[in-house]
Amino acid sequence: MRNSLAMLGNYFITGVRAVLRHKTHLALNLLGLTTGLASALLILLYASYELGFDKMHPNAANTYRLEQFFNPVNQRFPISSPAIKDLLHNYDDRIRLTRINMGAPELRLAGSAQTMTLQYPYSVEENISEFFHIETLAGDLATTLAQPNQIALSEQEAKRLFGTTRALGQQLQLGEQVFVVSAIFQWPAQSHFQAGSLRRMEDEVKSRGLAMNSVYSYLYLPADIDQYAMLTRLTSLLNEQTYGGQNIAELQLRALTDIHLYSNLAYEVKVNGSASTVAICLFLAALLILIAAINFINMSTARAGMRAKEVGVRKALGASRSQLFVQFMLESLLIAACAGLLAAVLVELLLPQFNLLVNRPLALDYLGSFGLILLGSVLSVGLLAGIYPAVFISAFDAKKVLSGDFQRGNTAIWLRKSLLVLQGAITIGLLVGTVVLQQQLHLLQNQPTGYDRQARLLVNGIKNEQLFWAGNQSLQQSLQQLSGVAAASMLDIQFTDTISQVGQIQVPGQPDMPMISEIGAGFNLVQAAGLTLLAGRDFSETYQTDWYQTQADRATAAVIITESLAQRAGYATPQDAVGQQWSKPGQTTTLQLTVVGVVADVQIGSALKQQEPLMFICGRSAMEYGNLILNLTPATAAATRDQVQQLVSERLQRQDLNISWLDDDYTVLYQNQQRQGKVIAIFAALAIALTCVGLFGLAAFSAEQRSREVAMRKVLGAGRFSLVNLLASEYIRLMAISAVLAIPATFWALDSWLAEFSVRISQNPIWYLLAAAATFAICWCTVATLAWQVAGRKPAMVLRQQ
């Protein structure tokens, strides 16, 4: 044991001396490995955080969210009916279920006439703690959820409402009821949704029928249950009991731990992550570590000749190949460990900015996940980078080395060239991938939407009884009179969200019309939203009959339809649809619809979804909340926004209005793609920089080895520029091979990725040619810089030293 420790100590001392003997080689290795490790550590830290969402909850592995796919709108939604509980328990009474309903009445604090809105308010069932990990900081959460008129607040919500987390016993009024704060809790940050307040679910919500989809349902399923059979049976019952046997809805399950990365649906509580972003990040981390390891291998094998005599002497003194292998592996691990320490320091410095980039609260825990990632990365790089040089160098023949007949052979040379070709191919692929991703993102963000986003102001979350259900449109009229407001209207959806209403319409001569998406709207919609009017007119106060009106057995309203709906209804031109009378059957009354206008198709939500036919109904909405939309004069938009906020706050007695610019809301739709673009651009640049570091080290050694040849050519009359091209030509040929390999592989990979989008760019061959040219230029400039210095030496001095 003592001899083994002494031997390891000797190996360590020898390794330190060998490493310090070649300071330039050490500096290049540390620079490459530190940069690669630090970048990979940041990426892996982000990926680890994303992959850890919702895993802290009890029984997370067997918990699912019940979702529905609605065929008429070709969309999947994360909400379901409270009445699903009875169907589930009748199917298998071992299934456990908790239901969560989002929303709350308007809030008034004691002594204030102003109304507010709770942030992320939920009414829940008492068993929610069996499904979600909720840390109770004060009070009793179980008691709060078991009794009416009690409410639990999160730390953040308590501070927002009362200025302190010590809010137990405080009262607040929701609608007509007074609630007492009886618990303070903390919801996990790594959860696919967040909660600001929890209260007992009302009996009225629990008793809603199957047709009312208003809750998030989470199921705990026994391991032996046949999920496919269960969903098939329940879907059949749901369609029979709710939709008269039509194939309208399909029940589906989503694993709790998959929601954050794989679910980007309408009605998600917050914007989730992206599995593709995590996959790209892991791929980039692997590339960065691979490039750093390639640099180490190339420089180690290139300088193997300098260690040949040392190996020969040690073998002559009795050292075995395995002992030499251990020594060189220890040297590799020693350099990797030093690079790891430097990388940890670099990560500490860069983490705050990286957190802003990925919008995550990443933290370093050296005794936790980060420590394991750091240790694993250092060992991986040390072993990956050191194993071939250790095998290669320890295999030198002592007799040939000491006799001066040593030849390094072609194996190491071909390995270095192959690895350099691989680096070049990676560089070309990353350059093209960065350009394609940015072009695709630009296309998505600038895709025609059918509405104008510039200077459009939204006032969100207003109760519909103050908009569509009011006896007059006084609020809209008051806003219209403000200077700087070109037009004001209302919608019961957000253009950047989704459509929640569909209905059957009857069109003369078209008996097979499918269900059509419906949007409630107000007067001046076309002008306020910037829709493209193709035929007819806008909703107008001049025609009061446009507004939804009810009579004994019938109701009337004007509608504006999109161009695709006009085509589906069988009209040859948009003008042919204007003035047509349609009907919408209801349970008690029939709604008579008059088409007054046709607009260009409108994109609801992101361009990842297909545009669909839809119609705007004037003055009618079945939604609980609506939004104001205003067209402002761009030159005075900021000042007008303040006037709008003041007017609406006074009129509605609200002090926490949710006001946003439509253009900003649209940008948020693509934040995952934007994050992908930024991450890929930054780390692609780092990967290219690492390639340059490796190329610099390899070229420096090659140029030094060929300095005698350069000197002789210079004596014979060769010019300095021709000598530079001579030394660089070998690397340019290798980059040409890289281009041949990279272009088809990159094209196939990017084409597969682009196939996921409904709107996509076409790959341009110019991008590949420019990427290859850029790689050639980077390679030539790196090598030429060193070659120029070597070619500038005096031949006599070089030949005298050789």
Image (tube, grey):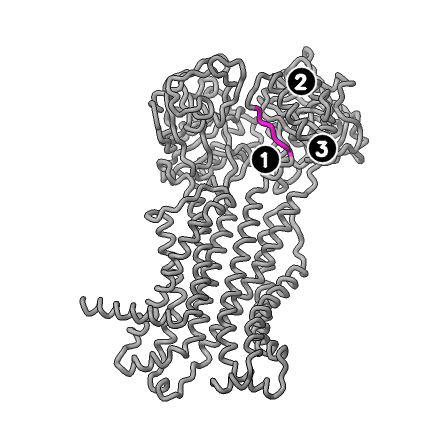
Residue of label 2? 475
Query: In the visual, does 341 lie left or right of 568?
Result: left
Which residue appears at 45% of the width and 60% of the height? Answer: 289
Which residue appears at 41% of the width and 76% of the height? Answer: 304
Which residue appears at 30% of the width and 79% of the height? Answer: 314
Q: Nearer the viewer, residue 219 or 50?
A: 50
Check if mark 3's residue and mark 1's residue have beta carbons within 8 Å: no
Residue 406 picture location, percent across and down: 40, 85
Query: Are there few (<14), some (14-19), or many (20+) residues within 10 Å of tag 1?
Result: few
Q: Main secondary structure of the magenta part?
A: strand
2 or 1: tag closer to the N-terminus: 1
Which residue appears at 55% of the width and 80% of the height? Answer: 793
Check if mark 2's residue and mark 3's residue have beta carbons within 8 Å: no
3 or 1: tag closer to the N-terminus: 1
Q: In terms of image quadrants, where is residue 267?
A: top right
Residue of label 3? 634
Between label 3 and label 1, give the one nearer the viewer: 3
Residue of label 1? 71
Residue 400 picture location, percent across and down: 36, 86
Q: Which residues are magenta?
A: 657-662
Q: Nearer the viewer, residue 129 or 774?
A: 774
For residue 241, say whether it is visible: no
